[in-house]
Image (cartoon, rainbow, N blue to C red):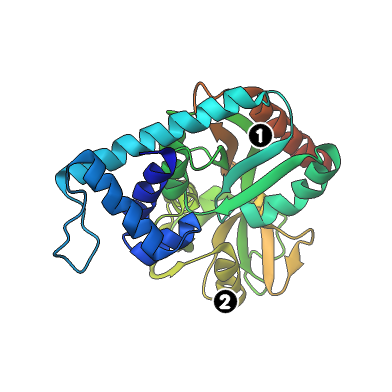
Amino acid sequence: MNIRDFEYLVALADHKHFRKAAEACFVSQPTLSGQIRKLEDELGTALLERSSRRVLFTEAGLQLVEQAKTILKEVKTFKDMASGQSSSMSGPMHIGFIPTLGPYLLPRIIPAVKTEYPDLELYLHEAQTAQLVRQLEEGKLDCLVLASVDETQPFKEIEVYQEPLSVAVPSDHEWADREVIDMSLLSGKTVLSLGDGHCLRDQALGFCFAAGAKDDERFKATSLETLRNMVAAGTGITLLPELSLPAEHERDGVCYIRATNPVPSRTIVLVYRPGSPLRERYEQFAQMIKAQLEKRIPAAA
């Protein structure tokens, strides 16, 4: 057996489909299927239930998948240590971003990355927090840039930005002319929110509930842009993170009002696995993100 066999096994467990697993490994389906069967023969145990039309792992197969994930993670760490790149900003780096941050943060930092670290090869992955954390645990991602939540506590966190949230209202709303709004005014109001799985949903609603507002159960947005468009259509009000806001107080039917007492916010962090040999690289990358935000958003300083 070899490392590639472990990659095939883990890919099949992730995708539950031979063709998709083969595509993820950049091999043909017969090649992947043949290697899995060869691995079973070598181990002397069945990894899959052959009688099922679906990809179902045996109990032994499930245990070996978990061990394969551990082996692959350790192999990656070994390669990182051997590469001699622990403090250099060169080579590949796979970074995960959440959907409520990536589209607004990346345009601010990518030009600086290309200028300051021309030898760094960024591979960007966007997904919700739970999926990103799982991929970081399995060694599929090197680090994450997201909002700090309970799921990220077992990892090393570097804070890069305390991002305030603003109240977004339709341009014809009674609060539209306000520059600042006290959160207590949300008492009794109904707010629009993102759907389940978005960490920003719980963070924003936490501040709204504390102010006495309630969640609009009739609608759950799939993205910040959907949420923004629903506000523009006059269906309600919401909280939006600062990096997603335009420079203007009002644009395209939405007015953005700074909130206070308290200031709702989320903590943006760079997260990586404890013990990673690339710690210095992540710290340097985090400082670059922080510097870019401080340069373009004075409030971040």
Left or right: residue 95 compared with residue 214: right
Q: Locate residue 52: give its quadrant.
A: bottom left
Labels in figure, total: 2
Q: Name the N-terminal-most of marks 1 and 2.
A: 1
Q: Position of residue 59 (x, y in %)?
A: 15, 45
- Separation of disc 1 and disc 2 at Cα? 34 Å
Residue pointed to by mark 1: 160
Considering every residue shown, the one lying at the far right of the view is 115
The three-letter code of the residue at mark 1 reads Val
* Disc 2: CA contacts within 10 A as few (<14), some (14-19) or many (>=20): some
Find numbered disc 1 in the image and state the secondary structure of the residue it sits on.
Answer: strand
Mark carried by residue 234: 2
> Which quarter of the rendering shows the N terminus?
top left
Q: Position of residue 251 (x, y in %)?
A: 74, 69
Q: Is residue 227 visible?
A: yes
Is mark 1 in CB contact (under 8 Å) with mark 2? no
Residue 13, relative to residue 2: is it above or below?
below
Residue drawn at x 64%, y 40% as measured from the top left:
93
Residue drawn at x 33%, y 63% as measured from the top left:
17
Residue in front for this viewpoint, 25 or 152: 25
Q: Position of residue 201 (x, y in %)?
A: 46, 54
Q: Position of residue 79 (x, y in %)?
A: 56, 29
